[in-house]
Image (spheres, rainbow, N blue to C red):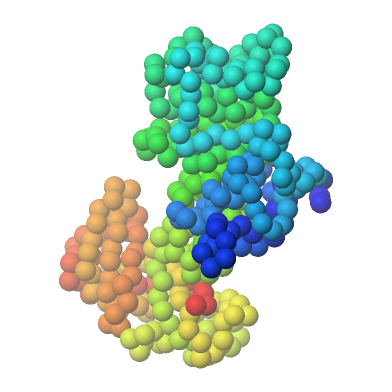
Amino acid sequence: MNDDTAISIRDVTKYYGSGADAVRALHGIDISIRHNEFFTLLGPSGCGKTTLLRTIGGFEDFQQGEIILYGESIKGLPANKRPVNTVFQHYALFPHMTIVDNIGFGLKMLGKPEQEIRRRSHEMLELVKLEEFAQRKPDQLSGGQQQRVALARALAPAPKVLLLDEPLSALDLKLRQAMRHELRHIQEALAMTFIFVTHDQQEALTMSDRIAVMSKGELQQIGPPEDIYNNPSNVFVADFIGETNLVPVTIRQISDGQARCVLDGGETITLNVAAGAEIREGGRASLSIRPEHMEVCPEESGSVQFSGTVTERVFLGNDAQIVVETAGGATLIARLQLEQWNPADTGHGKRVGISVKSDFVKLLAH
């Protein structure tokens, strides 16, 4: 294990139930999470991300594999003996206790001296910027403030790793956005490993050093946010991370870095796209094109790869969304900055062309 590895998850497999009724929750998960990394487990409900987090925290057992934390196996170790702590979706603060007593509760259970509990609790209050609320009760705080108290309580015992199970999901949009920056700031200030679970793609993209995308108990892709977004490894990742146009095609020819594809409607398109080993001539694939990488232009323009009819136009404030139906039956969504958007040229029923740069097109096998 490398010196900078905080957690090594090796071939972890978990089933719920047994025999014919067994349900596989995790299948052969292999991840190395670095020290001082903000690492996010991302995926839809039921994909196994929370189950994996709970196996790290000691709240779930697993049938195969091992988890190594800073060089020590923690398999079979009770949750209260692991040098990790968890912030849950529901904060579970003690309503009869003051904020400072809530934060110090874990330290008290560990038998720490009163002076250390008091000192550490006030350090955590200062970290989460709640010093003036020390003597209040939880019901006197807003949702965002309660979330900070739960965070401070989890950090007070100085765990080696902090686990966060969708801690922002109960907050409204603006508060969620503010807490994203706050969480990242705290993680950087403490130089601690955070493992964050979410189903919110924007949350993952804006906060993480690296993201692990999961589906049906399996890892789909691990990488920095920019790589996950710009170079998805398969159709699931492309579709789940942000918005994309997935255009089904048949690969007619691959030559000199170019792929000649036939759309289901019979149109042919030739693009300079990197074709992986799984892409074969005669095989099925999908073109993945992000809406912001599509330019709407006159149909007769020489750079047009697609042409069709505008079926929908939506003003979104910072930009506009145009939906175009091609002759072959493909539905394409383009997002245009306002300076590119001419309502007169993109109205319902208008014929338009769509130009895309090959650098932004990904060819993904089915």
The image position of residue 330, as x and y in percent, is 32, 77
Is 351 or 112 nearer to us in this picture? 112
Q: Nearer the viewer, residue 140 or 232?
A: 140
Horizontal side of residue 183 vs 200, given as left or right: right
Q: Classify 19 as above or below 272.
A: above
Residue 189 image position (x, y, % from top left): 65, 29
From where the camera sits, is residue 261 visible? Answer: no
- Where in the figure is residue 356, as x and y percent of width and height? 42, 71
Q: Quadrant of residue 326?
A: bottom left
In the image, taking residue 280 as reference, residue 89 lies left or right, namely left
Which residue is rendered at x = 61% and y = 77% of the image? 276
Q: Is residue 240 above or below residue 264?
A: above
Counting labels gives: 0
Q: Position of residue 160 (x, y in %)?
A: 71, 34
Residue 51 visible in the snapshot: yes
32 displayed left or right of 297: right
Residue depicted at x 65% and y 20% = 109
Task: Tell me: residue 82, above or below residue 201.
Answer: above
What's the residue at 40%, 60% (across, down)? 243
Write the residue at 54% across / 89% down: 281
Q: Is residue 286 left or right of residue 81?
A: left
